[in-house]
Image (spheres, helix red, strand yellow):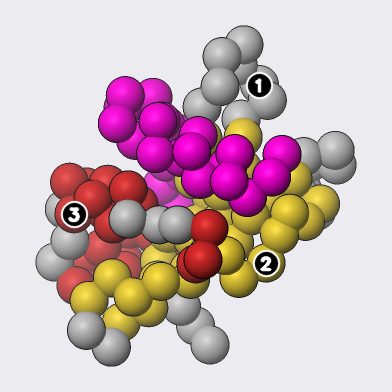
């Protein structure tokens, strides 16, 4: 999958509310820290473009054969979020799995 394809799938999944958002502690803590609602996060994810790509496609170390894409983008002034996504191959239709969406640690 190309970066353009994954970004298009991200936007489509967010718009259709068919994405899978992994509820990790880092993801929840970053939302809480900055007072972000899921609506805020969805709007942010819809703003991601291929120019925000930091790494990828890369092999998913947890699921061999899957590819991950990592994006970094400012969500608020001076606050950059790290976003790691992949196409969810466990379902028959195309949706995005959002593995990480939290404050960048670098």
* Percent x, y of residue 47: 32, 55
> What secondary structure is the magenta-colored segment mainly?
helix
**Which label is found at residue 90?**
1
**Which label is found at residue 67?**
none
Please determine whether, in this image, residue 76 is positioned above or below residue 16.
below
Which of pointers 1 and 2 indicates the residue nearer the eye? 2
Q: CA distance from mark 2 to mark 3?
A: 24 Å
Q: CA distance from mark 1 to mark 3?
A: 27 Å
**Which label is found at residue 40?**
3
The residue lying at 69 percent from left, 45 percent from top is 2
Relative placement, left or right, of 48 versus 98 is left
Q: Quick check: is 13 in the magenta stretch?
A: yes
Which of pointers 2 and 3 indicates the residue nearer the eye? 2
Which region of the structure is painted magenta?
1-25
The residue lying at 53 percent from left, 87 percent from top is 106
Work out whether mark 1 precedes mark 3 in sequence or the reverse, and give the earlier one.
Answer: 3
Q: CA distance from mark 1 to mark 2?
A: 23 Å
Q: Secondary structure at mark 3?
A: helix
The residue lying at 49 percent from left, 83 percent from top is 105
* Percent x, y of residue 15: 29, 31
Q: Quick check: is 5 in the magenta stretch?
A: yes
Work out whether mark 2 precedes mark 3 in sequence or the reverse, and give the earlier one.
Answer: 3
Res 103 visible:
no
Relative placement, left or right, of 85 versus 31 is right
Which of pointers 1 and 3 indicates the residue nearer the eye? 3
Q: Determine the residue located farthest toward the top in the rendered image.
A: 92
The residue lying at 40 percent from left, 57 percent from top is 48
Q: Secondary structure at mark 2?
A: strand
Work out whether mark 1 precedes mark 2 in sequence or the reverse, and give the earlier one.
Answer: 2
**Which label is found at residue 55?**
2
Q: Which of the pair 1/103 is nearer the observer?
A: 1
């Amino acid at each position: 999958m190309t970066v353009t394809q994954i970004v298009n799938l991200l936007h489509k999944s967010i718009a259709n509310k068919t994405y899978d958002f992994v509820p990790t502690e880092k993801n929840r803590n970053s939302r809480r820290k900055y007072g972000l609602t899921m609506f805020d996060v969805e709007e942010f994810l819809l703003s991601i473009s291929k120019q925000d790509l930091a790494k990828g496609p890369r092999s998913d170390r947890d699921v061999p054969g899957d590819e991950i894409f990592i994006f970094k983008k400012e969500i608020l002034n001076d606050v950059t979020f790290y976003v790691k996504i992949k196409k969810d191959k466990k379902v028959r239709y195309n949706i995005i799995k959002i593995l990480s969406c939290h404050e960048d640690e670098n």
